[in-house]
Amino acid sequence: MTILILIPARIDSTRLPGKPLADIAGKPMIAQVAARALESKVGRVIVATDSEKVAEAARAEGVEAIVTKGNHQSGSDRIFEALQTADPEGKAEIIINLQGDLPTIPPEDVRAVLRPLEKPDVDIATLGVEITEEEEKTNPNVVKIVGVPVTDSGERLRALYFTRATAPWGDGPLYHHVGIYAYRRAALEKFVSLPAGTLEKRERLEQLRALEAGMRIDAEIVQSVPLGVDTPEDLEKARQMLAKKG
């Protein structure tokens, strides 16, 4: 399969202004995310951003960058615009949407998100991690996957729902959703053409739009949640983690 990794990066951030350009271990954050994508060695890597400064920072590291419109409602819309520019002939069969604020994501997890697409009836693939901290089970900022195992070993779920609530009820594991997606090209085209769904608006989770439309999402279960950088505290943690990595 021909695979593209597209990294959406918006310059504005309420809690961390200029987030993609924040220095982490001597490089802007967007360069660190792109480095993890390149280390995965699964395909061409492109930054999709609304800022020429962010594009320049990516290009300075030898990474392709495309400047998109500034009014996109989601990262999915931004990468779809970039896809039209980067691959107008439609050669890419799989598009990975890697959020631009995951500078510590393991490259092997970027590879892992492709595994559910080995089944031809899966439209979109993502990642999950079993929740081990009790406070995360009730934290609305921790999105949970409600799903059923599709393998005997339980390392993959078919997603039935995503929620900020504590779900499902009863004994058994809960799973933290990791926001990286691998789309079949046709699935991405369909997804961005759909209006926002009722549950999507209520939960503020765009992946519910796909489920409401009858699309299939499977989640590969991995071992750790990558640090999403949203606050100055997160940024300092990322700096410490990558400084240790060297």
Image (cartoon, rainbow, N blue to C red):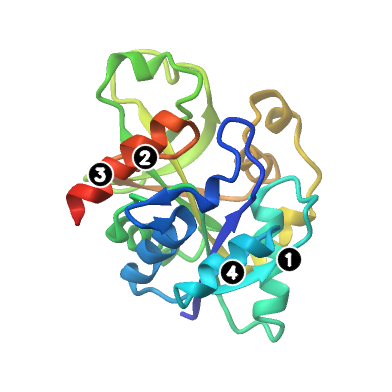
Q: Name the residue under label 2.
A: 227
Q: Name the residue under label 1.
A: 81
Residue type at numbered disc 2? Leu
Measured as percent of width and height from the top left, residue 156 is found at 34, 47
Measured as percent of width and height from the top left, residue 158 is found at 44, 44
Residue type at numbered disc 3? Met
Return the mark for residue 181.
none
Q: Nearer the viewer, residue 83 or 232?
A: 232
Image marks 2 and 3: residues in contact by CB distance under 8 Å:
yes
Measured as percent of width and height from the top left, residue 110 is found at 37, 59
The residue sitting at 38% across, 71% down in the picture is 38
Q: Mark 4 points at which residue?
A: 56
How many C-alpha atoms fall within 10 Å of the one at disc 4: few (<14), some, or many (≥20)? some
Q: Which of marks 4 and 3 is in front?
A: 4
The residue sitting at 64% across, 50% down in the picture is 10
The answer to whether residue 145 shows anywhere in this view is no
